Amino acid sequence: MGLLEHVEIAPLPPERYEAVITPEKVQDVQEAIETAQEVFAGRAIWNVNSTSAGGGVAEMLRSLLAYARGAGVDARWTVIKGNADFFEITKRIHNHLHSFIGDGGQLGDAERQKYEAALQPNVEEFLTAVNTERDIALLHDPQTAGMIPALKAAGVPVVWRCHVGIDNPDDLARTAWNFLRPYVVQADAYVFSRKTFVWEGLDEAKTYLIAPSIDAFSPKNREMDPDIVLAILAKAGLIKGNNFPKAIFLRQDGTPADVVHASEVYTEELPDEFTRLVLQVSRWDALKDPLGVIQGFADHIAPASDAHLMYAGPMTAAVSDDPEGLEVLNGAIALWRSLPDAIRRRVHLACLPMDDGEENAAMVNALQRKSTVVVQKSLAEGFGLTVAEAMWKARPVVASRIGGIQDQIEDGVTGILLDDASNLVAYGAAVVDLLSNPDKAERIGLGAMERVRDEFLGVRSLIQYVQLLSRIVAA
């Protein structure tokens, strides 16, 4: 068995988007499909990252590549493997790119040697699968950047996609840039989510901006009957009760499936179907600020409302490229246990099962649809796909004014932005205001849904990638 994981991707028809976009955008999609079929005939487009489950990058790849294949493009997905040292170093790079100290370790010559040594067998095996005269490699995030020199030396066109960044970089962020720069500058193009994320000194002619997007028809975002919402949450062990219909969700291809796995929930007593929920869905990552979300709720939301808090993340063992997840989860559990009894009963920490990625997505969908207010109180954020997901479901979102979140939310119109993510008083006041003013919450939620329809659905990303890769082929 080889080192690399080649992810199976079933094609999906991009025409399904005709039901939710304007006729003008339908025409744009059709033109992009025609271009792609002509330009990419006989070529494979290889997407490479470090995990097939957990996090927004994996979710986007699973969706976008399915529609690309449905449009007749040979889009492929390969996942590299790494050892403990490799993922410790790449997590450090990830943290530094957000100006976060993380484990406090170095990014020097010793780390570079370990990083390159872990990538070497991956790139060697990858080159045995690639047609170096025809194919294109689209590499994602710091874990894959070190593959660029070898692929370029073999004649493979390379695009490097950076999904993370920070608006106001400091010396810590520049340390990560300098570690990655020798690899990245060799790519034919680099893609960032927003202009402020682009590193200083990169070739502007090779720099492209493509914001992330969501799939309106994935198990995470498709319409869901309210009774099914409750049934899924009950079967997943996220609310109490059993007087619901069978917990069935629709997979990406439209076939029905049963929810069979349960979550691990740290709770005194589960909420019921009538409980108003304040929800944050995030990986167990210090940059998502689970401790601040919990403490702010306990101090400033619970005393002024009847709502409960649900913080939902993946089971940590399932996220292979994040070695800090268990430590962050344990910190959140310790804080939860320290809360006063009356508050602790209204706080629930859920680890969602990852045995079936589409089942997990359906659970998140149900949680977002059950919530009254959705929160994304990150300390740093590349884009924040969970924001777009909640907005698509017409939920009012309170989120930090950082990164791509501020591209999605127009403050007071399509959500509420927090100027200082560490200000728990302001966070609490914003959430309580929405809980106390349902008409305002509904207005903002509806505006949010329209914002996503206009700007953040997957067909926009597909069109932009066709444009970019067409230029790479023509160069």
Image: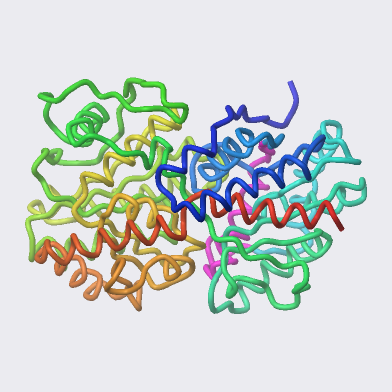
Q: Which residue is drawn at 32% across and 24% down?
A: 259
Q: Which residue is drawn at 34% across and 64% down?
A: 377
Q: Quadrant of residue 44?
A: top right
Residue 128's spot in the image, x, y percent? 86, 32
Q: Reply yes or no: does residue 43 show up in magenta.
A: no
Residue numbers of the magenta segment: 77-105
Horizontal relation, residue 55 to residue 203: left or right:
left
Viewer-proximal residue, 131 or 326?
Answer: 131
**Vertical order, 115 against 255 (above or below):** below
Quadrant in the picture for the N terminus: top right
Residue 321's spot in the image, x, y percent? 57, 44
Horizontal relation, residue 294 to residue 101: left or right:
left
Q: Reply yes or no: does residue 93 show up in magenta.
A: yes
Viewer-proximal residue, 309 or 39?
Answer: 39
Viewer-proximal residue, 287 or 44?
Answer: 44
Residue 317's spot in the image, x, y percent? 47, 36
Q: Which residue is drawn at 57% across and 42% down?
A: 64
**Vertical order, 202 against 232 (above or below):** below
Quadrant in the picture for the C terminus: bottom right
